[in-house]
Image (cartoon, helix red, strand yellow):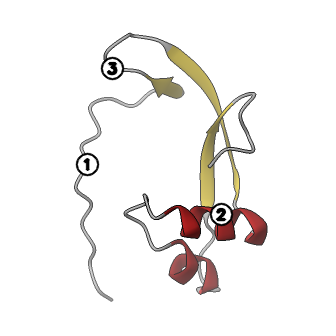
Amino acid sequence: MVEKRQDFMVDRLTDSICNVKSGDSFQTTVALVSKVELGAASQSGTWKFDWKTEFRDISREVYKLTINGNEDIM
């Protein structure tokens, strides 16, 4: 198994997404990623995560975290 490291820091654990600068908090939903959503995320080119590789691995489940009311945005 290859270990992969991420280049971000988790500053605190919450039950929502918090904007560090403004202090705004947004309630979130965790759900499985669909194949359609996977295509959009892979094409954006902004993720530091290989969505397709993770999705194809049948030993894993890939989840998304979305802001309530913006579930279609990934």
Q: Which residue is mark 1?
A: 8
Which of disc 2 and disc 1 is earlier in sequence?
Answer: 1
Q: Quadrant of residue 40?
A: bottom right
Q: Residues within 10 Å of mark 3 (few under 14, many from 20)?
A: few
C-alpha distance separating marks 3 and 1: 14 Å
Point out the image quarter for the N terminus.
Answer: bottom left
28 vs 30: above or below? above
Which of disc 1 and disc 3 is earlier in sequence?
Answer: 1
Helix, strand, or loop for circle 3? loop
Q: Which residue is mark 3?
A: 20
Position of residue 18 measured from the top left corner of the image (x, y, whole percent): 44, 22
Residue type (three-letter) at the residue carrying disc 3: Val
Image-based side of 17 in relation to 28, left or right: left
C-alpha distance separating marks 2 and 3: 27 Å
What residue is shown at x 31% (from left), y 15% (from top)?
A: 21
59 vs 29: above or below? below
67 vs 5: above or below? above
Kindly identify which numbered label has been placed on residue 40: 2
